[in-house]
Amino acid sequence: MQRVSINLVGALLGIALVTVASGEANAKVAITRIEHCTNLSHQFDDALKTHATATQVTAAKTLQRRGNRYCANNKQAQGIRMLANALKLLGVTPTDLYP
């Protein structure tokens, strides 16, 4: 009888662990493209403060403006690419990449 109880507790513990693990996987909420545009634009503004002496600052600012314009005109995928490229011109790796 004790062996059955131990097996039952082990099985229930296994099910609980799987449930918790799947709950954590679902806890990651995908951000929208608009939120991603906003995050990249803010990241660019922050990066500009620390990388103001980068050789391609003017080109990066131009890409940021174009990216923001695309994001505002419901062309977020193109805007995200532009903003990511603007960050790369500053020598910064874009974070929070869209999945």
Image (tube, helix red, strand yellow):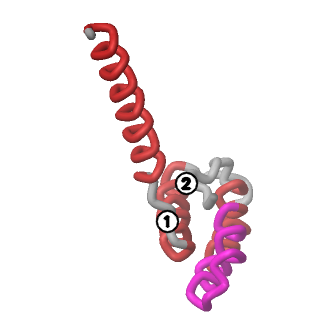
Is 55 located above or below residue 79 in the figure? above
Magenta-colored span: 66-84
Indicate the quadrant containing the N terminus: top left, top right, bottom left or bottom right.
Answer: top left
Residue at label 2? 96
In this view of the protein, can residue 58 be seen by the observer?
Answer: no
| x and y, in percent, of residue 86 in the image | 68, 63
CB-based contact (under 8 Å), mark 1 and mark 2: yes
**Image side of residue 16 versus residue 56, left or right:** left
Assess disc 2: are there few (<14), some (14-19) or many (≥20) residues with their C-alpha within 10 Å of its C-alpha. Answer: few
Q: Where, by quadrant of the figure, is residue 52 drawn?
A: bottom right
In front of the other: 88 or 37: 37
Between 47 and 14, the one nearer to me in the picture: 14
Query: Which quarter of the image is occupied by the C terminus?
Result: bottom right
Q: Secondary structure at mark 1?
A: loop
* 60 in magenta: no
Disc count in the image?
Answer: 2
Q: Residues within 10 Å of mark 1 (few under 14, many from 20)?
A: few
Image coordinates of residue 50 in percent, x first then y, are 51, 49
Residue 54, percent from left and from top? 67, 52
Splitting the image into 4 quarters, where does residue 73 fall? bottom right
Please say whether residue 28 is visible from this viewpoint: yes
Left/right of residue 47 with respect to residue 17 in the rendered view: right
Query: Which residue occupies 52% across, 71% down?
Result: 32
Mark 1 lies on residue: 31
The residue at the point 64 percent across, 67 percent down is 83
The residue shown at (49%, 65%) is 31
Residue 20 at what x, y percent from top left? Answer: 37, 39
The correct choice, above or below, for 59 with respect to 34 in the image is above
Query: Does 60 sit above or below residue 65?
Result: above
Between circles 1 and 2, the one closer to the viewer is 1
**View extreme (top): residue:** 2
Q: Quadrant of residue 85?
A: bottom right
